[in-house]
Amino acid sequence: MPSFFRSLALNVLLTGALVAQVTHAYPQPAVVRSQDATIPSHGSITSDPVSIVPSFGGEADGELYKRSKELKIAQEPDQSYNCPATNNYAETSYTSGQLKAAFIKAAQYANDGQQIGDRNYPHVFGNGENLPFNCGRSTMEFPLDRDSPGTVYSGQSVRTLPDRLVFEFKDGKKEGKAKFCGVMRHGNNGFINMAKDPGRGKEMVYYGDSFNLNYVLREMGNPFPGAFDNSSLSFSIEELYLSRLGQPTKDQLDAHEHSERFRLQEMGAVQRLDKEISDALIQTFFSVVYPLCPIFDLSDFHAKYKSKQISPLVLQALYFVAAAHCEFSWIEKAGFSTRYMATFTFYQRAKGLYYANYESDAIATVQALYLLSHWWGSPLEQKDPWHWTGLAVGLAQALGLHQSRAYTGLPEKQQKLWRRIWWTVYTQDILMALTLGNTPHVNDAYCSVPLLSEADIEDDEDNQDDLHDPHLFGTRTQESRLYLVYLVDLAKRTSQCLMALFGASSDESTIQTSLDKLSSWQTALPGALQRNNSTMSLQNGYWSSLIHLSYKNGFHYPDRLRIGSLPSDAAVNIVRILEDMMSSEVLTVSSLRTLPAVFASLSVQIANISGNSPDGAEISKHRARFCMLCLKTLEDRWPPLPWYYSMFSRILRKMSCEIPDDGRHSPQSSHDRSLGASSMTEPLSHALWRQPQCSQVSEIPSGSFMAQILTEEADYGVMMECFPFSSLLTDSISGQSSNPFDEAGNA
């Protein structure tokens, strides 16, 4: 109890210090919000706290426009406004502080009889009968800078600025009166009324470990001028922070930021590809990857992509994932000779943007981090899929996406988007933990968000009716829509199984209950996700096969003793599904979900080769050769696969299982040479390539540990400690098996 009071006292002290600092940094407003309040002189407005944005509008305006009479404010903006996306422009939000700064500047211009820009703003609105909200007779409009909402319009061209602040201005002999009316957007078919934002900014800002700060601000009140929304609050906090730094420190920070921006520009991180190539990659992503991860609002994404306002971090991450799945002709058109260099380039750009803190929207950062979890550059790379998955989970949980209380007050559309993002990240974490034998980053005990439902997915799909380029996003089938819903359910049951099997307080009853629940998952699948035939396509049969692969991968622990155990049967089923995928030419579509199953089945086949009768061993050798063929087919999609292919080839040869054409002497095709020794150090034609990756196979000295693994006999038990997928072979190599799944299957 005393600790509670100490915490409460600390919060009160923090509040006092924060309010004192804010009061010192931002004097109280001189503009009073009463009907008859008189606005101060123009020079004093420039220091008014409503100007919480970097540029208030005119450095010398106080000298150029001398006041001729008093200006009274009848009503000013007191809420944020949000404009929905239109054909040519993305959704835009303006905070009350930003609108207030623009309104006061526009009213001052009107009162002084001054206008700016080639269209003379502010000017009388001539289409009063078409105004989407009520305003007085003397209605005027003033542009809002959509490209930089924090900057007051200063006279530039309004060709790409469709948003207007509308106010009534009465020009009296002794005084002028201004009343704010609303905000609208010029659309294709008239004027669109901007809706008042319900109190939360569109951009989700991350404040760090912010529970205490959020508590103080929400319980004690917002100490900053303007509305209590994320964008204005984050800017105020940053301004307060910077105001306490000395000028030499500020100069150093500015120099560092300039250097980072220059580096990002130099490596092409903020540039987008030519439209044809960019559209092809986006189309690939939404066709073959998006059903795995519906982490975007399609209408919002389309508007931002079309208007070139999409986050560079998200775009580069999308390019990276798409480059691993697209037709190779698009790789060549983008200027790359190999798929590896294309994925490596886009990955490095996205990684550079992330570590430079380029993106301020934390939701966009979570989306990009999930996409970066598709990267695995070399067997020894530390920033592997597990690394990026951990970052995505950590930030998502810091934002509260895993807890229902964080969704309070959000529009239903945004709630559904957040649930899709959370459960996508959650599923990635659980299934990867299962594959790698790691402890999940997620703890179910702290998750209170309802499971994903078909309604969450359908809401996303319904947005396609508003899209003008549907070819970018493809069409969805019921099978592809249901895929993630039931994969999330599988991941949830798998997580409970992992906790029961390996948790600190596991018991036989809990283990059996969790295994029964996991086994019942398959019987509860709807007809659309049942495997009915061996022929499949993306429109029919593929997603059901993929989800069954993920399910069978849960039983991958190898049993050396006999064929017919639960893991062995699962490995056989995996091979059958892979055979159908291979014959239907869809094996390479989603390698991130396919590869773990290939590795799992292959490890079980290796265990069965060494631990069963000669006839059973021959059958397992045949299946192992097919798994090796799958790895050979997929090696263009994931850089470490040639290394693993070579390793497994050596293991199988030791077991008298020869692999036809294992690539030791055959030349590589130009399509695959990015993954061979001759091209691992191939430089780029521009400044992106800074240094080679020392962990790549081609650059390892001949006497090193990895070279020994690839060229001579090695202690594979020690080797397995170094690499992902280590749990798949440890039991086979050591000759031990203590898998509770086997015990459950043999019971």
Image (cartoon, rainbow, N blue to C red):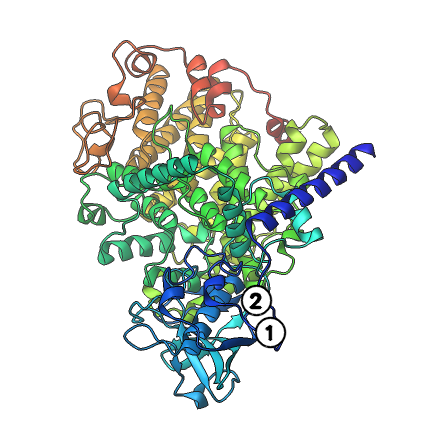
- The answer to whether residue 629 is above or below residue 307 is above
Residue position marked by numbered label 1 in the rendering: 37
CB within 8 Å, label 1 to label 2: yes
Is residue 36 in view?
A: yes
Q: Where does the N terminus fall, quadrant-wise?
A: top right
- The answer to whether residue 606 is above or below residue 187 is above
Q: Residue at x 60, y 27 (%)?
A: 742
Q: In the visual, does 173 lie left or right of 8?
A: left
Q: Residue 491 lies in what quarter of the image?
A: top right
Q: In the visual, does 236 lie left or right of 505?
A: left
The amino acid pointed to by label 2 is: Val
Q: Residue 77 lies in what quarter of the image?
A: bottom right
**Rendering coords of residue 667 (x, y %):** 16, 28
**Rendering coords of residue 331 (x, y %):** 22, 46
**Rendering coords of residue 555 (x, y %):** 54, 33
Q: Nearer the viewer, residue 532 or 37?
A: 37
Q: Which mark is residue 31?
A: 2
Q: Residue at x 48, y 69 (%)?
A: 104
Q: Where does the C terminus fall, quadrant-wise?
A: top right
**Badge 1: how crowded within 10 Å, few (<14), some, or many (20+)?**
few
Q: Nearer the viewer, residue 196 or 494?
A: 196
Q: CA distance from mark 1 to mark 2?
A: 7 Å
